[in-house]
Image: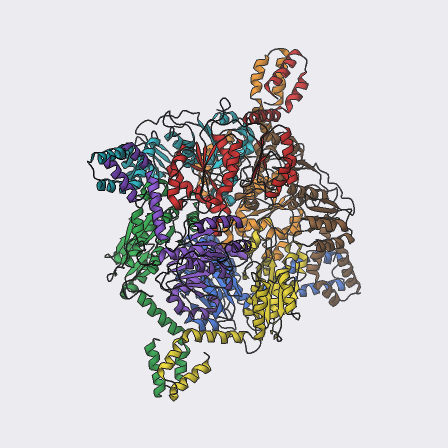
Chain colours: A blue, B yellow, C orange, D brown, E red, F cyan, G green, H purple
Amino acid sequence: MNPERLEELLRAVERGDTGVAAALEELRRLPYRDIGVATIDHHRALRQGVPEVVFGAGKSPSQMVEITAEMVRGGHNVLITRVDEVAAEVLGRAYPEGRHNPVARTLWLEQHPVPQRPCAPVALVCAGTSDIPVAEETLETLSAVGLAHRKIYDVGVSGLHRLLGRAEEMSDASAVVVFAGMEAALPSVVGGLVAGPIIAVPTSVGYGTNFGGLTALLGMLNSCASGITVVNVDNGFGAAMALHRMLPRTSGSDPK
Amino acid sequence: MNPERLEELLRAVERGDTGVAAALEELRRLPYRDIGVATIDHHRALRQGVPEVVFGAGKSPSQMVEITAEMVRGGHNVLITRVDEVAAEVLGRAYPEGRHNPVARTLWLEQHPVPQRPCAPVALVCAGTSDIPVAEETLETLSAVGLAHRKIYDVGVSGLHRLLGRAEEMSDASAVVVFAGMEAALPSVVGGLVAGPIIAVPTSVGYGTNFGGLTALLGMLNSCASGITVVNVDNGFGAAMALHRMLPRTSGSDPK
Amino acid sequence: MNPERLEELLRAVERGDTGVAAALEELRRLPYRDIGVATIDHHRALRQGVPEVVFGAGKSPSQMVEITAEMVRGGHNVLITRVDEVAAEVLGRAYPEGRHNPVARTLWLEQHPVPQRPCAPVALVCAGTSDIPVAEETLETLSAVGLAHRKIYDVGVSGLHRLLGRAEEMSDASAVVVFAGMEAALPSVVGGLVAGPIIAVPTSVGYGTNFGGLTALLGMLNSCASGITVVNVDNGFGAAMALHRMLPRTSGSDPK
Amino acid sequence: MNPERLEELLRAVERGDTGVAAALEELRRLPYRDIGVATIDHHRALRQGVPEVVFGAGKSPSQMVEITAEMVRGGHNVLITRVDEVAAEVLGRAYPEGRHNPVARTLWLEQHPVPQRPCAPVALVCAGTSDIPVAEETLETLSAVGLAHRKIYDVGVSGLHRLLGRAEEMSDASAVVVFAGMEAALPSVVGGLVAGPIIAVPTSVGYGTNFGGLTALLGMLNSCASGITVVNVDNGFGAAMALHRMLPRTSGSDPK
Amino acid sequence: MNPERLEELLRAVERGDTGVAAALEELRRLPYRDIGVATIDHHRALRQGVPEVVFGAGKSPSQMVEITAEMVRGGHNVLITRVDEVAAEVLGRAYPEGRHNPVARTLWLEQHPVPQRPCAPVALVCAGTSDIPVAEETLETLSAVGLAHRKIYDVGVSGLHRLLGRAEEMSDASAVVVFAGMEAALPSVVGGLVAGPIIAVPTSVGYGTNFGGLTALLGMLNSCASGITVVNVDNGFGAAMALHRMLPRTSGSDPK
Amino acid sequence: MNPERLEELLRAVERGDTGVAAALEELRRLPYRDIGVATIDHHRALRQGVPEVVFGAGKSPSQMVEITAEMVRGGHNVLITRVDEVAAEVLGRAYPEGRHNPVARTLWLEQHPVPQRPCAPVALVCAGTSDIPVAEETLETLSAVGLAHRKIYDVGVSGLHRLLGRAEEMSDASAVVVFAGMEAALPSVVGGLVAGPIIAVPTSVGYGTNFGGLTALLGMLNSCASGITVVNVDNGFGAAMALHRMLPRTSGSDPK
Amino acid sequence: MNPERLEELLRAVERGDTGVAAALEELRRLPYRDIGVATIDHHRALRQGVPEVVFGAGKSPSQMVEITAEMVRGGHNVLITRVDEVAAEVLGRAYPEGRHNPVARTLWLEQHPVPQRPCAPVALVCAGTSDIPVAEETLETLSAVGLAHRKIYDVGVSGLHRLLGRAEEMSDASAVVVFAGMEAALPSVVGGLVAGPIIAVPTSVGYGTNFGGLTALLGMLNSCASGITVVNVDNGFGAAMALHRMLPRTSGSDPK
Amino acid sequence: MNPERLEELLRAVERGDTGVAAALEELRRLPYRDIGVATIDHHRALRQGVPEVVFGAGKSPSQMVEITAEMVRGGHNVLITRVDEVAAEVLGRAYPEGRHNPVARTLWLEQHPVPQRPCAPVALVCAGTSDIPVAEETLETLSAVGLAHRKIYDVGVSGLHRLLGRAEEMSDASAVVVFAGMEAALPSVVGGLVAGPIIAVPTSVGYGTNFGGLTALLGMLNSCASGITVVNVDNGFGAAMALHRMLPRTSGSDPK
C-alpha cells in the first residue's frame, strides 16, 4: 500500500464512502503489506540499473531457463552466476543474444542499458592466474551495476616488482578488490600501498592445507594492514555487491 | 628522499656541483628510500586528522607510556586501544587530559582538533548489550578519524520491532556497522533494510559452541543478504579503519 | 512375553500343569525377552498410524525392494527416505501405486489410512528455495505420522516483509520447523514472532565457509531466541519424528 | 497501536475530528509501531507467569543488581542465571528473600506466584553427577515457567540396570531432558525407551578429546534414536525454554 | 531377584501360598531388577580385588572425602584419581595411611590385599619425562587391579639406541603401554619390535600445534604398525582398565 | 646374522681360520643386520599361521596381482584388503580358488591351513546394517590369523531389547569388537554388560555432522565405560590385528 | 633501469643533454622499475640451470601447451608438475622429446643441459610405497635444478631394521627429504640418526582420521627430533626448491 | 662399544684369552649397545660447541636447577629455554654468571667458548614487535651453536618501504628466519627478494581467528613463494636447530 492509496482510503472514510469496519479490515493487513510496499519501493529505487540475479549453483538448466524467462518478461536485466558448461549451452540456445563469460561462469541478458556510475574504475587485483575466474565474476557483476573496472592480474607478492609497477593504477581506482588463494598475503601488501577501500576475496586456489580457501580467508581476516574487509571464499559476486552499496550512484538516486 | 631533494640533486649534477659518481652513490639506495618517502608523503597526506594508533594488547603499561610519549612529542594525536584497567591507571597519571573510554578500553590523546568528515554519521548497530565494548572501540576510532556516529544498541533480531523501529536511522547513515555474537543473524536482517554500505563485526559473545566468535564470523560470511563485508572477531578498530578508507574526506584530500 | 502369557504361565504353575523347573526355564530368559515384548508392545501402541521407515542412503535399489517387500507383507505402511533417481525407478516398477516425491526423495507406500492427529498443521518455513528438498522430507514424514502441514517457503530474513506477511500463519501452527542454510538467521527471527514450539533444521545449502551445513548448525545452536531446538544437518526426517513425539495423538493413545 | 486505538483514529477521521494529513502522519510510522505493539501484546500474553531473565555471565554484580532492581520495580518475577559465588553474595544482600541455587548458579526472585502448568512433570535425566549443575539450571527455569520436574540423576548407560529401573518414570513424564557429557550415549538409549518428547543437552563434562562438550553435542545430533532435538552445550536454560514453548499452558492462554 | 528367590516365588504359587495376581505384581518389575541383580552379581564377581574408583577432577576435597568415606565403610579398596595438591592434603589428613602418588595425582586406600594376577609385568614405555605423570596414573591403577609393571621411561625415537636397548624388556612384558605426546612416533616403532598387545596413550605434552594432545592422538590412530589400540588423551586410568579387561585373572574368576 | 652364525664366526677367529680384520668387517655391518635377522626371526615366529597382507587401497589391480604373485610364490597365505569390484574381477581371474568377500572387500588366498587359536570366538557387534562391511573386514582378518568369530549384527542401543537378548553371547566371547557409526553409543552400553576386552571401531556411517566417522571416534574415546580401546575409523583390519596381538596363540608359540 | 642506464642519464644531465624536468620524469617511475630490474637481474642470476616451472593442476592441456610453448620459445628448460594422464598425452604429442615421469606426474623439457651442483646426492626417504609419487616429484625437481638424489624407499619405522640398514646412506647425503603419510613417525627417527639438514614432506596417504595429510603434517611439526622443517602436504616440488635455496651452487653463482 | 673395543675382543678370542661363550655373551647385547655407541660418538662429534638444552616449560625451578647442575658437572654448555620469571630468579641465584635473556626467556651457562661457524650471519626478520620474543629464542640458540645473527625487526609487509630498505641485508645473510603472526604474509614477500634458505616461524601473535598461531602456520605452509620451510608455532629453538643442521661447521667436523 503506497501513501497515495492510504490517503485515498482515509479520504474515503472522511467522505463516508468507506465504513470504519471496512477500512479497519483493509488496514488490518497493513503492517507487513506496507513494509512490503516500502521495501519494494526502496528496492525499486535501488534497482535503477540493477539486474535481477539468479544464483545458478544447484539449479538445473531448465529451472534456470524458467526463472530467467519470468524475469525477462518483467523487463529486467538478468545476471546468472555459477553457470556451468551444460547450463551455458542450454541458456545460450534460449538467449543467443546473451553475453556468456565462460571464465566467470556468468550469463548477462541486457534488456535496457545500465546507467554508468560516476566514479573511477574498480581495480581487480589477482595474485595468480587461478584466481581469475573469481575476479571475472566480480567483473561481470560490477558491469551489471554500472561500475567500470581495471584488471591487474597475476601480481603475487613473491614477484614484488610486478605489483609495485602497478601501484598507481590501484591508488587511482575508486576501490580495490584483491583476489588471492594460498596464503593470501596480497591484501596486506596492497593495504600498505593504497589509501582507498579494499575488499579481500579469498579463493579456493591451492592444495594440501589450503582447506578449500579457509587458509586464505583466515589470512585476510588477520591482515596486518588495517581497514580491509573480507567476503566469503570465492564470493566474487558478493564483493561486487559490496561495492554497489559503497560507491556513489547516479545523481539523485543516492540513498543518503 | 622527496621530489624537492631529488630535483636539487639533479640540478647539482647539471651545475657540476655534484659528480656523477657521488650522485649515483646517492641514488643507489634510492629505490627503497624513495618508496619510503613516497609512502611517507602518501601517509602524511592521509594523516590529516588521522591519529597514530597503539595496539595495547601484549604491551606493558610502561611500554605504552614510552611509545605514546614519543608520538606525543611528534605532535600526533594518539589513539591507544586494548587498554586494560591497570594500563588505564598508569596512562591516566601520565596523561590526565586524555579521554579514557573504559567500555571501549581506549585512550585518546588529542594534540590538535580532528577535521570532521563531510558525510552523515555512521550507524553502530548492536545485537545485544554484550557487543557494546566492541562497538565502542569502533566509535572511538571513528571519532579519531573525524567520522560521526549514531548508537543503535540492543536491537537483536528476536525482538524485531525494536530493530524495525530504527530502520530509518540506519538508512540515513553513511554506513552501518553491525556488531553481533552468538548466531549473528542481525547483519542479514539489516542487509535487507538498508541500501548503503554494511560492515559486520563478529563478537566473541556467547558460550558453548560459540567458539570465541567463530560461529558469528561464519554466519556473517555466509549471510543471505548480499554485499556485506566482514572483519575479524572483536575487531572494532578494523571496522572503523575500513570506513576511514571508504567514506569521503575533507575537500582536496580525497586520494581520488 | 506379554502379561497374558505370563499370567497363563503362573496359572499353569498354580494348577500344577507346569512344573517349577519348566517355569523357571521359561522365565530364565525372561528379562530381555520380556523387555523385548514390552518394547514391541510399546512400539505397536505407538505405531498406530506410524509407518516403518527405510533409510535409503547407502542401500542398493534391490536391497530396498527386498526390505520393503518384507514390511509390506507385514501390512505396514512404509516410508522410504533418501531415494535417488535410480532407486525411485526400480521401486516405482515394484510399487507403481506408491507416492514418489522426487524433491523430498521419498517413497510412500500406504497399506491402510493413517489416522490424522488432533492438532493444527505444522508450519514448514524455508529461508530459500534450496532448502525445499529437506522441508519436503519433513513434509512426507509428517504426513506418514498423521500430521498436517502448511508450506511457508522462500521467506529469508533479507526480505523481511515476506516473512512478516506470514507471521500469523506461523503463530497459528501447532509447531514451526525452520529450514535454513547459509547463516541460518531465520530461526532467530521466527523465534521472536512465534510463541509455540520451534525446531530448526540446518541445511547444507551454501558454499565457501558453509562447510556442508556446519555454519548453519552452529548458528542455530547459538540462536539469540530462546527455546529453539536443533536436529542434524539436512535431517528433515528427524524434525518430523520430533514432532511425532511432541504433538498430541489420537484420543486414548497418548502415552501420558 | 492496538486495534482500539486504530478504530478510534478512523472514527475521528470519519467524524472529521482528525484531518487526513494528521491521520496520515499518525499512520506513517505505523508499520513498525504496530508490529511493535503486536509483538509486545504477544509477549505480554506469553508472560503470564513467565519471569524476566537476566543472563549473568559477563555482567558485574553491581550491573546485575541494577538490572534486577528495575525488573523488580516493574513487578516481574526475575530469574538470574550464571550467578557466580561473588555475585550470589552481592545479590543475596540486596535480595535476602531470593532463592539461590548454588549448584544451578541461579537466583530466583518471586514477586507473585507462578501459575502451574496442566501437565505431568518433566523428567530430568543425568548421565553422571557432573552433569547435575546444568540439569539444575533447567530445573530452576522450569520452575520459573510453572513446570514441575522429576530428578533421575546418575543413570549412565554403562550401568544399564539403574537406567532401566527408572524407565517408567521417564515414560510417565510429559517430556524428558537428557543431560550428558563425554560420549553422550544416554539420549540414544532413552530414545528407545520413551515415546514422548526428548531434548538432549550436551554438557562440557569430560577431558582429553571432549573438546568442551563438542563431542557430546555431535553425538547427540547423530543419535541413532529418531526424533531427539538438541540445544547448545551446557544450555540448561534453553532446554527449559523449549519445554515452555512445547508444553500446554494454563487454560485459555495457549496460543493455538 | 536371584534364581533362588524366583524359584521360591514359583513354588509359593504352586503351593497356593501366593496368588497369581500378587506373583504377577512381583514379576512386573522383574525385568530391570533382575538385570540389575545380574549386573550387580556380575560386578561383584569382577570386583574380587578391584577397587572402587573416584574420578577427582571437578570434585571438591570435601566431596571426595565424603564419597571416599562411604566406600571405605563398605570395606572396599579405593583409588582416587586426579587428586590435586589441595585435595591431597585434605584427604591425607583424613586417611594418613593412604598411599599418595603426587606425580600420578592418585591416592590409594587399601582395605585388604589385592590378589596378584598370574601374568608377566606390563611395560610402561614413555617417550619423554613429561609423559611420566600419565604413565604413573596407569601404574597406580594397574597396581590396584593386581597387575605388576616395569618402567621404561624416556626412550623417545629420536634417540633410538635407548629404545632398542630395552626391546627385550618390552617383548617379555604381558603387554606394553606406550605414552607419548608431541608427534607420538613411539608406538609405531614399538609396534615393529613387540609382538604382544600394545595400548597407546596420547599425552597433552607439547606446544604450538600440539592442540592439547590431539596431534598425538591422531598420530597413534594412524600408526603404520598394525594392531595398536588407543585411549583418550591423558587417560592413563583407561589404559590400565583395558589391561584389566584383557589380561588373565586369578584362577577360577576369569569370565571365559 | 643368527646366533649360530655368530658363534661360528667367533670359533673361526678362535681357530685362526678367520682373521680379526675380516671378522671386524663382517661385524661392522652387524648392528642393523643382526637386528634385521632378529626381527625377521621374530616375524617368522609370529607368522606361523599369519598371512601376508596387501592393503589394496590406492593400488591398481595389476599392481595387486604382481605383489600377490610374489607372496604366493613365497608360499605365504595372502590377505588382500580394500579390494574394489574391478580389482576383485582381475584378481579373481588370476586366483579363481581365492575366497572373495565382496562385503568385506577382501580376497583370501590360502596356501596352507591356518592353525586355529585356543580361545573362544570373538564377538563382532554391529550397531546397524551399514557397519557390516567394516565388521566383515575384521571377520576375514580374524579368520586369517586363526581366530573364530560370532556375528551379533544390528543391535543398536535404541532397540535395547535386541542387545540385551544377546548379552550372554558377548560375555562368553574371548573379546568383543563393537562397530558403530553415528553417535557410537553402543560400546558404552556393551562396556557395562561385558567384563572382557572390548575394541571399538568407529565407522563412517552417517550424514550431516557425522564428519566421516569423526563423531563416532570421539564418542568412543570419551566412552563412560572404562577400559575400552579404539582404532582408526573403518579400520576393521586393525581391530583384528589387535586381537591377534592380544589373544593366546598355539602352544609354544606365545611370545611370553 | 640498470646502473649503466642510470649513469648514462646522470651524465646526460651533467652534459646538459637532458633537462632536469625530463630526468625527474624518467626517475619518477624509477622505484619500482629499478626494483623490477634488480629483481629480474637477481632472478636471472639464479636461473643459471633453473627451469621455468608450470603448475599443471587446474590448467587444461591446451593451456599447458600454450604456456609451455612460450617458455620453450624463450629457450628455457621447462618443468611441468601435476600433469595428469590426459595432459601427459596432449603434451607428449607436442613435445615427444620430453621426459614424462608418470609416477611423479611431471614433464621435463630440456633445452640446454643443467649444470650439476657441487654436493653429495640428496637422500629421498619414503615410509611406504604410497609416498613414492610425492618423492618422485621432488626427484624430478631436484634434477631440474642440478641436484643428484638417492632413493631410500619403503623404510617405515615399524620395520626398523630396513631403516637402520640404510642409515649410512642418509648420513652421507647432503640433505635428507623424508616423505611420510599416516602418523609420520619417520622424520623423528631419521632426525636421531642423521646430523645434516632434514626436510619433512607430509603426504596425503592414509584413511579415516588421516584428514588428507593433516595428521602427518601435525606429527612432523611436533617432531621430538629438533631441527626438522616442514613443507605443505604432498608438496614434493617445494621440498626440492628449499634444497635449491639451501645447497651450494656452481662456483661463482652462489648469492653469498 | 667402539671399534677399538670390538677389535680388542676379537683379538682376545683369537689369543684364546676370551672364550667363545663369553664373547658371545658380550656380543649378545651388541646390536643396540653398538648403535648406542655409534650414536653417542656421532653425537659427541656434533657436540663440539653444541650445548645441552633444557626445555623449561612444565618443569619446576628446582627441577631445572637439578637437571642443570648435572649437565654443568659434565662440563657442558647449557641452554635453558622457556624460563619464566620465577625460574629465572631461582636459576639466577644458582648461576649468577649465567646470561639471562628475559625477552627470549632463555638462560645460557657457558662452560667453554663456542667455536664460531664459518658463514655469514643469519638474518632474523620480524613482522612486528610482538614476534620479537620468538626471534630472540632463535637468536640465543644460534649463539649457542656458534652462528652469528643480524636483527631485522619490525618490517611487516604493510609498510613495504621498511622491508625493501633492508633487502640487501637479507640477501647477504647465510639464511633468513622470518617470524610472523597474524596472516604471516612476510615470508612470501621475503621469498621473492632472497635467493638463499628461508625458514618461517609462525608466532601466536594476534587475536580473533588467529587461533594461537594456526592461521600464521597455514599461511606459511601455503606460501606462494617456493622453497620456504616451516617449523611449529613459536618454535624459535627449532628454527635455530634447523640452521645448525644446514649451515657449514668448523673445518673437519662437517658430517659430509
Residue B144 sits above or below residue D3 on the image:
below
Nearest the viewer among B165 and C21 is C21
- E201 relative to G204 in the view: left or right: right
| Viewport quadrant of the N terminus of chain A | bottom right
Q: Give x and y (percent) for residue G133.
A: 33, 49
Q: Give x and y (percent) for residue F83.
A: 36, 38
Q: Give x and y (percent) for residue G26.
A: 39, 80
Q: Can residue H109 be spotted in the picture?
A: yes
Residue with the most extreme left position? F17
Nearest the viewer among B42 and G243 is G243
| Viewport quadrant of the C terminus of chain A | bottom right
Q: Can residue D76 be spotted in the picture?
A: no
Q: Give x and y (percent) for residue D203.
A: 60, 43
- D69 relative to F200 in the view: left or right: right
Q: Place residue D23 in its image quadrant.
A: bottom right
How many marks are shown on the rendered structure? Answer: 0
Residue A125 sits above or below residue C85 on the image:
below
